[in-house]
Amino acid sequence: MRWITLVGRIGTVILAIGLALLVAWLIPSGSSSWSGVSQPVEPEQYMISELGVYSPQTAFRISVESSDNVRVYLVGVSPDELNDWIALLRETYPNFFETVSNFYTVPLIFFHEAYPEQTSPYLGDPQTESRIWDVAVLDKGLQTHPEIILWGPPPSSSFSHELFPADVLHIWVIVANPSDGTVAVDTKVWDLTTLAPKERVIRPAILFISIGIALAIPWLILRKLKKGTF
Amino acid sequence: MAKGRPFLEIFTYALDEDYRFPLLEIFAFLFALGTFVFADFALYGQTGEAQAYSLVSTLCGFPLLFIFVILILKNVAYGLGSDLDTGVMQTLFSYPLKRRHILTAKLLSGLGIALLLLLGIQIFGLFLLAPDVILKYPGTVFLTYAANLCSPALLLAGLMLLLTLRLKRGGLALAMGFVLFFGGLVISGLVSFIAYGAGSTLVLKIWAVINPNSALQAYYYHMGAAGFASETWGPSFSEVLLYLGAGYLIVAAIFVAGYIYFQRRLEI
């Protein structure tokens, strides 16, 4: 009897936790604002757009539409790593990095990986500019830092994705045009607010509710029988 | 009869009394949902360990900590007080067990299970919410919980134990527990003002012995949350560990005093 009670109470506690997770899952995500960018991407070039700082509770939904097949990546860098990168760029490109915005942090890190010998890129020079946004530079950068890729689907002309990062991250969207012609790219981003990342919560919720019910049933039946007897 | 069996008997009796159905389930539900509701990610200004500390601190903040303090004060003050008041303790003393083992069984149920519930659920919830924080900074998460639980939760539990044994009445001890809890919150706010006004770190250091979380907070924020002491006090990590150790020594001393009183002085 004591064992059935003990197991039953453990079951009801697990059930309660499962129900709390279910409630967290059921509360709908709120979409607070959206922003959009329309930009052509030159042949064998890529573009990058900073989406902002996101957390597991403040996420976003992104849609990318293009006139031809493109490659899309969502990359995320932790605030610590971003600070390290900025420090590295200040050291590598003294007098230069101060003059450009943080927007250039990721492209310049990729550029540094591809051309470590280049000491001071001059953005006014079309050739340098072209080299910075070269798809080969992007590939080298992503090869060197695969850990920053949060999402990288196969090439297509239409993408849609919802992302809940596992930590606080600075997030960028990268659109690469590997084709020979210019591609028109239309990017839309909706900010989402949620109590808990739905895909990470629903499985444990179902598991906990199932285990909880299975463990609690014998005790609940016994409790009902006992109440009926007396 | 084996020694473990009567201990288990008293432990299960205490569990039944402390957590009548569905009390434990309601607390489990609140802790689990509260983890998602009260988690607050500082998006700007903090990085790495400081960010992990800040996240865990929001979960050890007022609403959830207050729920936890209610639970342990109810168990320690009201539960133990009722047993002393109604004569149940006399029956428990008839078991072939030393008095200290009886008290251990009661505290294991009233305090141990509550702690297990809080930490287990919150850490699991945090893992679901932000797995990278738990996996990257397990030491910071552990230290933040250790500092936040030392005071007021465990310190109050120890004081309530002593007070309940002395008064032999749960209700009065419970009321005094709440007074001490809110008194602690007021003092916590006052300490920063006093330190700022006096321009001295001494009062902050004394308070950090009783409430080690203030030292940990000062370490991560340089007391930035209060905005006053950043210029006056920023302890090193080893100092924080010393304050935490001192805080737990005080808590341990209070519990030892409770055990000694229960074993030698308690007259029923």
Image (cartoon, helix red, strand yellow):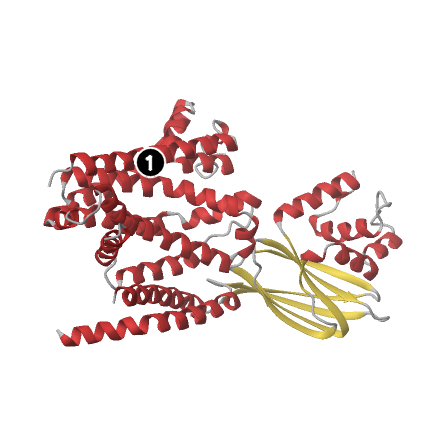
In the rendered image, the residue lying farthest to the right is A127
Q: Residue, x 35% and y 39% (percent of image)?
A: B151
The quarter of the picture where the C terminus of chain A appears is: bottom left
Q: Residues within 10 Å of mark 1 (few under 14, many from 20)?
A: some
The quarter of the picture where the N terminus of chain A appears is: bottom left
Residue B192 visible in the picture: no
Decide if residue B11 is on the left or right side of residue B28.
left
Decide if residue A46 is on the left or right side of residue B199.
right
Can you say whether A216 is above or below A135 in the image? below
In the rendered image, the residue lying farthest to the front is B1
Residue B2, image x, y percentages: 26, 52
Viewer-closest of B119 and A166: B119
Quadrant of the rendered structure where residue B13 is? bottom left
Q: Amino acid at mark 1?
A: Ala
Residue B89, image x, y percentages: 15, 48
Viewer-closest of B21 and B268: B268
Quadrant of the rendered structure where residue A216 is? bottom left
Residue A52 visible in the picture: yes
